[in-house]
Image (cartoon, coloured by chain):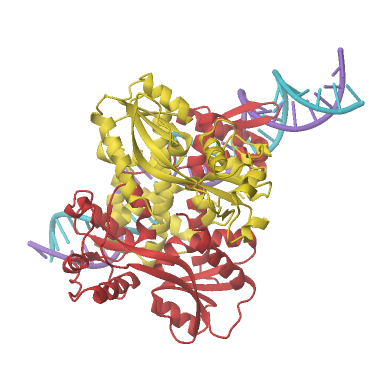
Chain colours: A yellow, B red, C cyan, D purple
Amino acid sequence: MPLSPRVSDLATFDLLLSVARLGSVGAAARAHDVTQPAASARLSHLERKLGLRLLDRSARGSRLTEHGALVADWARAAVDAAAAMDAGLRSLRVGAHSRLRVAASLTVAEYLLPHWLVALQAAAPDIAVALVAGNSDDVARAVLDDEVELGFVEGPQVPAGLTSRRVARDELTVIVAPGHPWARRRSGITPAELAATPLVSRERGSGTRRHLERAVGSATDVAVAPPLLELPSTTAIKTAVAEGVAPAVLSSLAVAADLAARTVVAVPVRDLDLTRDLRMVHRRGRRLIGPALELSAIAHRGVRARPR
Amino acid sequence: MPLSPRVSDLATFDLLLSVARLGSVGAAARAHDVTQPAASARLSHLERKLGLRLLDRSARGSRLTEHGALVADWARAAVDAAAAMDAGLRSLRVGAHSRLRVAASLTVAEYLLPHWLVALQAAAPDIAVALVAGNSDDVARAVLDDEVELGFVEGPQVPAGLTSRRVARDELTVIVAPGHPWARRRSGITPAELAATPLVSRERGSGTRRHLERAVGSATDVAVAPPLLELPSTTAIKTAVAEGVAPAVLSSLAVAADLAARTVVAVPVRDLDLTRDLRMVHRRGRRLIGPALELSAIAHRGVRARPR
DNA sequence: TGGCCTCATAGGCTCGCCTTATGCCGTTGT
DNA sequence: ACAACGGCATAAGGCGAGCCTATGAGGCCA
């Protein structure tokens, strides 16, 4: 089910947001480095395509209509997500002249870091960040070897030689397809049930998988069953779960959107603590300065500001 | 700051997601109704533009590289947001032949309903939904007058003649600019402080504003100060707050993304319950059937599946 | 009433993207 | 081992979307 062409042109929605912010089509056009007629035409075209009047045009400028305000709020969510992706993409380009090098475990790199990078760019636009994604061991090694100034890892153990600080708390979540028997279990499943069930899983060595094995191991005698299927990406796992292949255990950050859209369902687990800390690490004894300090502050403040 | 052209072409990222899901460029091309060379060229072009290899091409198909998997996860967030917007947009077109008519208060229409509509479309693709957005009074009236089958309202009071069911719980959140004095108040502010401070606010009559006045009124003798500034949209309010005009009180659903990006900061309020229920309503005595029942089930299940 | 701001329209051009046709290469099956 | 198949890349041609410049129309303010 491909995306409708109605919404694929994010640049025009971004233009609409600029009109809302700046109060006139011409000003928005200048902000986007196009001429006023081009902007005007694009917006008219959008209104035609959607079958909605979005703007009240007057001699003093343009304001959103009621529909326009609603559409603008929807669009902002999409544009923000795209901006986060863009911040991430910039950091992946091999940064020969990067001023800040960062390593992050997958969960952090996927769901948290892009937003921090957006905030960092707003605070200090000239900082180029280089990002390396890997598992927590890779990250720790990169920090110790001085390949990066800052690292982000999952899990309880902090490698020797590193100073750590919690930047977020995450919770592993059991997900199943909406039709799966566990989906009706309002009281949850037991750790033993979870351990006995072959899951769709990341490859051995992933932080999520290791954390699950440790948590289940300390709550029950049953060893975690070998996976039914190993897949290389979170996305692939969610797709497999949604198709009913088997349950999976993923970070709550990874499944939030899918839960909201009901492609998969969360199953509570009784008497098992699946929370884990996401930590920022840097070399012990080395003070953070400049860009690294800035990013560290942004990430840390995220702790309190996290949505419910 | 307009969106970078790197990420504005969502359709190509959607194509990348299809390649990941289907395992080959050709299959993704068919799913998107273009020829294989067109898809191949677009993906190559994207890789050039990003400076990253995203796909491992082989004679058996194409798989994501490590970078590709990360980019795909970022892209999925943006594409999902766009899909939600699309579902919302479809429902705004005046639905002469719509099979399900819905009215929703602004908070629900902005942040919840689009995702429910995506799920509904997945479950029943042929249902056309017509959405009317308004305040809770408008919604109640529309349901009572039989203009819509289903309504979604905010706040505690359920109008007579309507059956209600809670579908989500929301919390009003005090937000300030990152540099505002309150931003450092880890222990929070008092209800009296909040009441005494002129806020940036929606116009009188908005559900959020009324709920705040009621909650503060029952916790303190001080009446809520008149707003410093009234603005017509949530977006405008957040912008004003971020620019340091004054604090504001908005739904947690409205500010989650902004908190994560640190454009604004949440301030706890001591000894004041700012939670409120978001309710689905329909005419008393009338059983929900067909599409309305389906949407009602999706919305209700959302209660348990909500991200933390 | 003139100047200035807003947005809309018209004409001409460029360039991006798609389609069809074809070739190459690795895998698979007999 | 060889042939058939599936998957991806390249080439050439055509169409259309979107941009720019130039200009017009309408409201607001001095």
Q: How many marks?
A: 0
Relative to B140, is B263 on the left or the right? left
Relative to A44, is B231 on the left or the right? left
Quarter of the rendering occupied by the C terminus of chain A: bottom left
Residue drawn 63% across and 27% down? B57
Residue B121 lies, in percent from the top left, at: 60, 60
Front residue of B13/B160: it is: B160
Residue drawn 34% across and 44% down? B2
Quarter-of-image position of residue B245: bottom left
Residue B3 lies, in percent from the top left, at: 37, 43
Residue A118 lies, in percent from the top left, at: 34, 41
Residue B72 lies, in percent from the top left, at: 52, 38
In this rendering, the answer to whether B293 lies above or below A132 is: below
Residue B51 visible within the image: no
Front residue of B90/A126: it is: A126
Residue drawn 42% across and 54% down? A75
Quarter-of-image position of residue B135: bottom left
In this rendering, the answer to whether B140 lies above or below D25 is: below
Which residue reaches farthest front? A221
Residue A251 visible within the image: yes
In this rendering, the answer to whether A295 lies above or below B59 is: below
